[in-house]
Amino acid sequence: MGDLPPVGAGPLAVGLTTALHRAGLPAPPDRAAGLARALQLVPPVDRAALYWTCRVALVTDRAQLPVFDAVFSALFDGRLDPADSRGDPTAPPAVGSEPRTRPSPPDDRPAEPGGTGSAATGTGGDDGAEAEREVLLAAASAEERLRHTSFADLDAREVDEVRRLVRRLVLGTPPRRSRRRRPSRRAGDALDLRRTVRAAQRTGGDPARLVHVVRRSVPRPLVLLCDVSRSMEPYTRVYLTLLQGAVAGARAEAFVFSTRLTRLTRQLAVRDPDQALARAAAAAPDWAGGTRLAEAVRRFVADHGRRGPARGAVVLLLSDGWAQDDPEEVADAMRRLRRLAHRIVWVNPRRAAPGYAPLAGGMAAALPFCDAFVSGHSLAALEEVVAAVGGPGG
């Protein structure tokens, strides 16, 4: 099988996760760090052991296996440098000249002597393996293309595929210190008198052990406000899939607006994405209408502000900013929201257009009150949205 290339655990993990990312698989930095730690704790002795270590650390779905196998084979056929993370970020991974089959798990029994077949003899089935390799590369390249294609340029079949990929995204907010407290073994924020007195009863009333408490850390609330006016139609289906995932995964509050504000948290809580989309469209009578941005933000602050989910929350606002409201009204509504929210992230798919400038009245008025301004026009751009939502805590 050959010796493994002399590459350290860190460069190897970075190189492999970078290649997987280019092929369209989710490979965030934390998985690269986990793989590096695993390789340091259990150094692989051969290619099969390395394969299963990398697969356990990086593959989270059976559907990812074909692309993972193709990328892994490319790296360890000697055609890719595992320590090289440079190059064209949209290029598909290079593949070795000879296809490799997936190694057997380390605890499998060895093959019986005299076994037959192409796997035992090393001959036969080359044409089929080559065809399979080409299919895998084509699949990886197609998924990579979808990652960087604007949602407005996708056909119906591609939109459905992108929605499936969007459901993998996880929106996580930064933590904040809660008012609730938990016991601590170390000296904490305060002394828990009740537990201290209870513990003293076991030592004859002498408080031999002081029980301290510390404040808990909990994720900040997440609120999503999505523009479903006519100008946002090319992006609405994908964005609602993002809203549904946030409601299910982060217990977020979801609202849509066009000429009025509609809360969709309950409608999006179902597991079927198509059913959730249908229920959302039925609940918003102003779907694909005009845009009353100032009125929607003002209504949200009035109904869900100081005593509602907006207080101390991360607010994700998805809109192109083309509003019918007076810019001063938009600025006034955003100023009120700014006083309540911890962080405001504005997603404008028009931002990706060449030469774009936030000159629209609503967008120009709202931008000074935003902490982050991202495009979110493609799957790759939505990954930037995820990073912006999980921005600085406090």
Image (cartoon, rainbow, N blue to C red):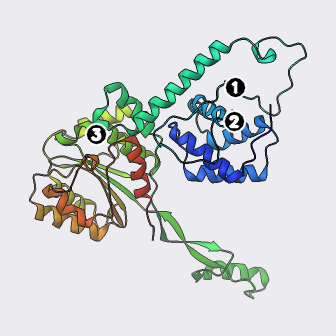
How far apart marks 2 and 3 lie (CA) works out to 40 Å
Q: Quadrant of the rendered structure where residue 214 is?
A: bottom right
Q: Is residue 248 above or below residue 275?
A: below
Residue at 79% from the left image edge and 49% from the top image edge = 42
Q: Quadrant of the rendered structure where residue 363 is?
A: bottom left
Note whether residue 280 is visible.
no
Q: Residues within 10 Å of mark 3 (few under 14, many from 20)?
A: many
Q: Nearer the viewer, mark 2 or mark 3?
A: 2
Question: What amino acid is labelled 1 in the image?
Answer: Arg
Label 3: element kind: helix
> Which residue is tagged 2?
76
Question: What amino acid is labelled 3 in the image?
Answer: Tyr
Q: Which mark is residue 235?
A: 3
Instruction: First in sequence, mark 2 or 3: give its number.
Output: 2
Note whether residue 52 is visible.
yes
Residues under numbered marks 2 and 1 in contact, where contact means CB atoms less than 8 Å apart: yes
Identify which residue, 247 or 31, lies in the foreground: 31
Q: Residues within 10 Å of mark 2 (few under 14, many from 20)?
A: some
Residue 200 position in % (x across, y down): 73, 83
> Which residue is tagged 1?
100
Label 2: element kind: helix
Q: Is residue 54 above or below residue 347?
A: above
Residues under numbered marks 1 and 3 in contact, where contact means CB atoms less than 8 Å apart: no
Q: Nearer the viewer, mark 1 or mark 3?
A: 1
Residue 44 position in % (x across, y down): 79, 43
